[in-house]
Amino acid sequence: MRTIVITGGTDGIGRALAAHYLRAGERVVVVGRSRQKFDALQQETGGDARFIQADLSLVREIERVVAELQQYERIDALVLAASYVRYKRAETEEGLEHQFALFYLGRALLVRGLADRLGTVVNLVVPGAPKDAIQWNDLQLEKDYTWKRTNLQFRRANELLAVDLPIHVRYHRHSPGFVRTSFAGDVDGLARMGVNVLVRVLGTTVDKAIRPIIALIDDDDRAEATRLRQETARIVEGVRSTGRTP
Ligand SMILES: NC(=O)c1ccc[n+]([C@@H]2O[C@H](COP(=O)([O-])OP(=O)(O)OC[C@H]3O[C@@H](n4cnc5c(N)ncnc54)[C@H](OP(=O)(O)O)[C@@H]3O)[C@@H](O)[C@H]2O)c1
């Protein structure tokens, strides 16, 4: 049985993934805010579902989640899908810009804090932000906040997160495209209407959206990579000792 941790596993894409892996007989640890939503998921799927109730925009809560997850010797997959879009700048009660806290800091602290036991990470964030997207002199965007600016900044930060992870962690950034979910967030009238129309017209279903994510989690090349490393060592050793391929 694998252990799969899913942030934002109470709704949308994260929930659909949680349901898939629970039905497949895996242990799934859901991290989210709503116990009610988790209870509904558990009733629907049964299986080894566990819940950590937490607000992943708060450092003290993220650190508690990391500490609770230390009970698992190995976390085969960590899916980062917690999402709450804020078009207007807002601060968490710890004084951080909310989108920076939820979409970057929450994810970074989880990945770094659990790196020693992680197999695969799938970070549901749109890849491909410009290299100058981080506002180094105004990380909290106090002077000039726009949703586009915070969005590009956290996307770039999630790219940089991949760069200095231990080599054993398979880190994927994955854009699910437009998916018909609740798009939870604080988005005002007109923008909300626009998003709803776009999602209805162009959006795909969560069941379709989770297929490539499942492929990333299940398609583990490690056994073949180990075999190739061993075979390479055997060839090189043979050439060293006999001057020829064994
Ligand atoms: N849907 C799309 O078209 C789309 C497009 C591009 C990228 N994505 C990415 O895909 C991922 C999933 O998106 P989605 O549309 O499936 O999301 P969603 O349906 O809006 O669900 C959001 C999830 O995040 C949790 N959440 C929100 N704020 C939280 C907080 N402060 N602490 C902990 N959990 C929190 C919610 O849990 P509670 O309800 O329990 O609070 C819920 O489970 C996100 O990373 C999103 O950026 C989605």
Image (cartoon, rainbow, N blue to C red):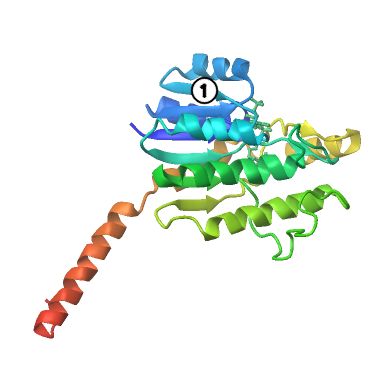
Q: Position of residue 154 (x, y in %)?
A: 69, 51
Q: Quadrant of residue 238?
A: bottom left
Where does the C terminus fall, quadrant-wise? bottom left
Asked if 84 appears above or below 229 in the picture, the reply is above
Camera-side residue: 31 or 191?
31
Q: Is 238 positioned to the left or the right of 73 in the image? A: left
The amino acid at mark 1 is Phe
- How would you rate the neighbour count of disc 1 (Cα within 10 Å): few for under 14, some for 14-19, many for 20 or more? many
Q: Secondary structure at mark 1?
A: strand
Q: Is 42 positioned to the left or the right of 204 in the image? A: left
User: Residue at 54% of width from left, 41% of height from top?
Assistant: 110
Camera-side residue: 168 or 6?
168
Q: Position of residue 170 (x, y in %)?
A: 44, 52
Q: Which residue is mark 1?
A: 51
User: Residue at 21% of width from left, 66% of height from top?
Assistant: 231
Q: Quadrant of ligand 1?
A: top right
Q: Position of residue 223 (x, y in %)?
A: 28, 53
Q: Position of residue 229 (x, y in %)?
A: 26, 64
User: Residue at 44% of width from left, 26% of height from top?
Assistant: 22
Residue 20 shows in the view? no
Q: Is 3 positioned to the left or the right of 235 in the image? A: right
Residue 168 shows in the view? yes
